Image: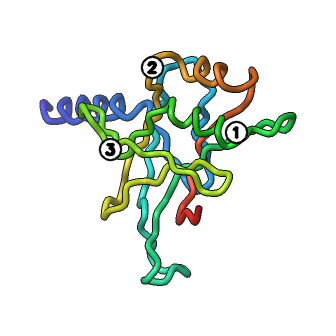
């Protein structure tokens, strides 16, 4: 009987620990228009790993997050996107009780701002986005963009940017 209560308690704690975690798949978006200083934790299964498919062995596979500013009324220039990227901290491999996680650096590829995931042999990683200044994500967006501009990070498998 004690073992049954122990298992029920263990499963309850496990579910609470992962309550604010969402699976992220190819071309899904981490929305950044939040009145919070960080997003929920997103989990990515099998990053940088492909079984079969059309990827030749000589090609290095690297997943990435693409900064997507959706504003049809105004062209958002690359320098504004880069300032926005510099205001964010994107952690790859985030774990709940660790003090430091690898921080992804933003790079410019053409007109796009890209955050490349850390490559390696991991079969699962966690991504968390937060602000450098500790203010809400929305206030950081409002400082650089017109109000109500949707912004997100699109997860791209086998990123070719």
Q: Is residue 103 above or below residue 9?
A: below
Distance between mark 3 and mark 1 Cα atoms: 24 Å
- Decide if residue 18 is on the left or right side of residue 39: left
Q: Is residue 114 above or below residue 63?
A: above
Distance between mark 2 and mark 3 Cα atoms: 18 Å
Whole-percent x and y of residue 94? 34, 40
Image quarter of the N terminus: top left
Image quarter of the C terminus: bottom right
Q: Which residue is mark 3?
A: 102
Residue at horizontal 58%, vertical 33%?
Answer: 83
Q: Nearer the viewer, residue 67 or 158?
A: 67
Q: Is residue 136 above or below residue 38?
A: above
Whole-percent x and y of residue 60? 44, 73
Whole-percent x and y of residue 136? 53, 18
Dot 2 falls on a residue whose secondary structure is loop
- N-term-proximal mark, 3 vs 1: 1
Residue at horizontal 44%, vertical 45%?
Answer: 105
Q: Which mark is residue 59?
A: none
Q: Which residue is mark 1?
A: 69
Q: Nearer the viewer, residue 152 or 108?
A: 108
Whole-percent x and y of residue 26? 58, 56
Q: Which residue is mark 2?
A: 133
Residue at horizontal 43%, vertical 42%?
Answer: 127
Circle 3 crowding by C-alpha within 10 Å: few under 14, some 14–19, many from 20: some
Circle 2 crowding by C-alpha within 10 Å: few under 14, some 14–19, many from 20: few
Q: Quadrant of residue 4?
A: top left
- N-term-proximal mark, 2 vs 3: 3
Residue contact at pointers 2 and 3, CB within 8 angstroms: no
Circle 1 crowding by C-alpha within 10 Å: few under 14, some 14–19, many from 20: some
Dot 1 falls on a residue whose secondary structure is strand
Dot 3 falls on a residue whose secondary structure is loop
Distance between mark 2 and mark 1 Cα atoms: 21 Å
């Amino acid at each position: 009987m004690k073992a049954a209560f122990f298992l029920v308690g263990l499963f309850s704690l496990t579910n609470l620990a992962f309550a604010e975690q969402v699976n992220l798949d190819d071309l899904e978006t981490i929305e950044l228009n939040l009145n919070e200083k960080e997003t929920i934790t997103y989990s990515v299964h099998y990053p940088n790993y492909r079984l079969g498919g059309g990827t030749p062995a000589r090609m290095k596979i690297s997943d990435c997050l693409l900064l997507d500013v959706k504003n049809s009324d105004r062209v958002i220039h690359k320098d504004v996107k880069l300032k926005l990227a510099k205001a964010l901290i994107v952690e790859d491999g985030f774990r709940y009780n660790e003090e430091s996680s690898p921080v992804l650096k933003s790079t410019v590829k053409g007109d796009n701002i890209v955050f490349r995931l850390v490559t390696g042999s991991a079969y699962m990683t966690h991504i968390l986005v937060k602000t450098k200044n500790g203010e809400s994500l929305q206030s950081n967006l409002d400082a650089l963009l017109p109000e109500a501009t949707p912004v997100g990070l699109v997860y791209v498998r086998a990123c070719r940017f």
